[in-house]
Image (tube, coloured by chain):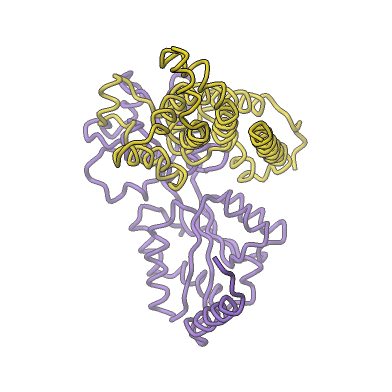
Amino acid sequence: MTASPLFDAAMIETILLTLKLAGITTVVLLLVGTPLAWWLAQGGGLWKEIVATVVALPIVLPPTVLGFYLLIAMGPQSPLTGLLGRQLSFTFTGLVLGSVIYSLPFVVNPIRNAFEAMGPRPLEAAATLRAAPLDAFVSVALPLASPGIMTGAILGFAHTVGEFGVVLMIGGGIPGRTKVLSVTIFDYVETLQWPKAHVLAGGMLAMSFVVILAMMLIERRLNGGRR
Amino acid sequence: MTFRPTALRSGIAALLAALALSSPARAAETVVAVAANFTEAATEIGEAFEKATGDRVTYSFGSTGQLYAQITQDAPFEVFLAADQARPEKAEAEGFAVPGSRFTYAVGKLVLYSTDAGAIDGSSDALEQPGFAHVAIANPVTAPYGAAAVEVMKALGLYETLEPKIVQGKSISQTHQFVATGNAELGFVALSQVVADDSGSKWMIPQELYTPIRQDAVLLEKGAGNAAARAYLDFLKSPEALAIIGKYGYGTED
């Protein structure tokens, strides 16, 4: 084994890029996912269930399936590329789009559950106090659903950090632009640089533990608050 | 849902019995780890081998680095067909392979390839045109075809200008996929991947521009006592196997 430092510049670049990807993805997911979850939480017909199913698909689909279709969707002949006027594969923006789709259910579902658990009464009360629907949503619904929003944000962030299949298929492994943590770990394992793989993989393990613990604590606070 | 251990146990017993019955006792079997670029050739060689010897071969395909990492972790592979010479050598040196069993079974050829029939005119010209955004190569650290691609670009004096356009596939298979889907206009791939493809365009890169990609095979310690594993390696040197290897766009030694 060659004596190289455990942390080198390439590794730090990878970690920062991954955090940037997960951070931006989480912000986009909250902006898109919260209204979507609100809409899904207000009962509806079959077509709403169909939308909810589409949102939930990435839970079941292998990331490689998603990555494969994204690779085709981002290719030169695809309508998406024509619409945007530029190719998204091998770009950071492409990774953000892929990650948003991949992590969508992990953000939407907890928020939707929180909205549904709230029930119609707080908003009815707000309406009798003459709050406009948007005002009621912002000053009543959002604070009440905040534990769900928090859980969604944590899950979405953690899932994006750990994502492998999608970034592998559409990323192109460009250092500093699309080469993220999970792909780097795979490279270290392939080249038998296991001490480095341990640093990153162990870090991921620790982060996942903290994430799940944090969610359980949030959930306990949520239940405690209701009692 | 109720959990019934007796039903579960009898189910497992039935499954095990079925597995035992499904493998005929007489035919010998060998498990071969194969570098992904050799997938198609290996499949055809496997069929010929089974026909010729009556032995069965099971393949595990992957990148050379990934397969080697698995070999060091006690994977049940008996023969290793790598995409380079380094890993089989290392396997020998580290005691995972039978000393003296190593030989070159194929010499990989690198081509520049595009799905666009008019993109490449049988020379390096396409690489010097400004009109493309991406050139795909395999990861030069883990894949010998990627390292060869970097050598070619450097030999042509184009590496500096092309570097911002390089996208890396994890393996030569993924590199081919980037080009085949049109996401990258050009790519350095293995001739074996595009040898049957007449719709695109390619440049057969002259051998003097890169170190020959010798792919070595080696008998692993796990297969040392298995006659079928040795028979497979012998078959790989037979005229029948050499013809298949040549057909898929590889050079052969001798």
Task: List x then y, in percent, for residue A190.
Answer: 61, 45
Image-quadrant location for residue B152: top left
Depth check, front residue: B240 or A89: A89
Task: List x then y, in percent, for residue A11.
Answer: 66, 29
Depth check, front residue: B179 or A26: A26
Q: Residue at x 40, y 33 (%)?
A: A40
User: Relative to B149, is A85 above or below?
Assistant: above
Q: Specify whether residue B163 is in view.
A: no
In this rendering, position of residue A75 left or right of residue B36: left
Q: Quadrant of the N terminus of chain B?
A: bottom right
Image-quadrant location for residue A151: top right
Depth check, front residue: B128 or A49: A49
User: Relative to B165, is B44 above or below?
Assistant: below
In this rendering, position of residue B70 left or right of residue B175: right
In this rendering, position of residue A206 left or right of residue B250: right
Q: Which chain is purple?
A: B
Depth check, front residue: B209 or B70: B70
Q: Specify whether residue B201 is in view.
A: yes
Q: Residue at x 42, y 15 (%)?
A: A134
User: Relative to A217, is B97 above or below?
Assistant: below
Task: List x then y, in percent, for residue A120.
Answer: 46, 29
Q: Residue at x 58, y 50 (%)?
A: B66
Task: List x then y, in percent, for residue B131.
Answer: 30, 20
Q: Which chain is yellow?
A: A
